[in-house]
Amino acid sequence: LFLRIARRIRRQTLTRIRPLGLNPHLSRALRVIGDAGPIRPSAVAERLDIAPRSASDSIATLLASGWIERTPDPEDRRAYRLSLTPAGRELSAQVRAIRRQVATEFFGELSAVDRDQLTSILQHLDTEAP
């Protein structure tokens, strides 16, 4: 049940981000770079829990689209870091707004009490075991 609901939310989100030129992989990479940038490509792969080659493909697409930029790493001149461009920040804000809108529409069917209870349950499940 939980996975079915998560898939519905993902599908609704994908339907709305696809016209922006994004797929789920690009959207996640954009979010990681925006949240953590400037960040090395290897760290992007780690945070996405994917192979570096897969991250490289997403990074190349984001670079070619002008949504992220590469700058030299001040700690290692052989390496570089990634960060959002102004267009990438704008796109990231659009994606976040879409995610919020989908969540509001989806969970808006619940009463305020039910939403609070669901939030509490999910927060409890999200805590890591010692």
Image (cartoon, grey):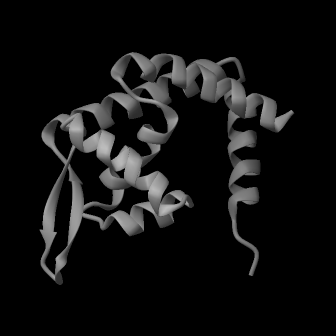
- Residue 32 percent across, percent down from the top left: 40, 53
User: Residue visible at 71% across and 24% down?
Assistant: 111
Question: In the picture provided, is 110 more to the left or to the right than 86?
Answer: right
User: Residue visible at 28% across and 32% down?
Assistant: 91
Count the marks. Answer: 0
Question: In the picture provided, is 125 more to the left or to the right than 90?
Answer: right
Question: In the picture provided, is 13 more to the left or to the right than 123?
Answer: left
Name the image quarter holding residue 86. Answer: top left
The residue sitting at the right extreme is 1
- Residue 122 percent across, percent down from the top left: 72, 49
Residue 31 seen by the camera: no
Quarter containing the N terminus: top right
Is residue 8 shown above or below 34? above
Residue 49 seen by the camera: yes
Is residue 49 shown above or below 129? above
Is residue 20 shown above or below 29? above
Name the image quarter holding residue 129. Answer: bottom right
- Residue 85 percent across, percent down from the top left: 16, 44
User: Residue visible at 22% across and 65% down?
Assistant: 81
Name the image quarter holding residue 62. Answer: top left
- Residue 45 percent across, percent down from the top left: 46, 61
Question: In the picture provided, is 67 more to the left or to the right than 8?
Answer: left
Quarter containing the C terminus: bottom right
User: Residue visible at 33% across and 61% down?
Assistant: 36
Is residue 54 shown above or below 117? below
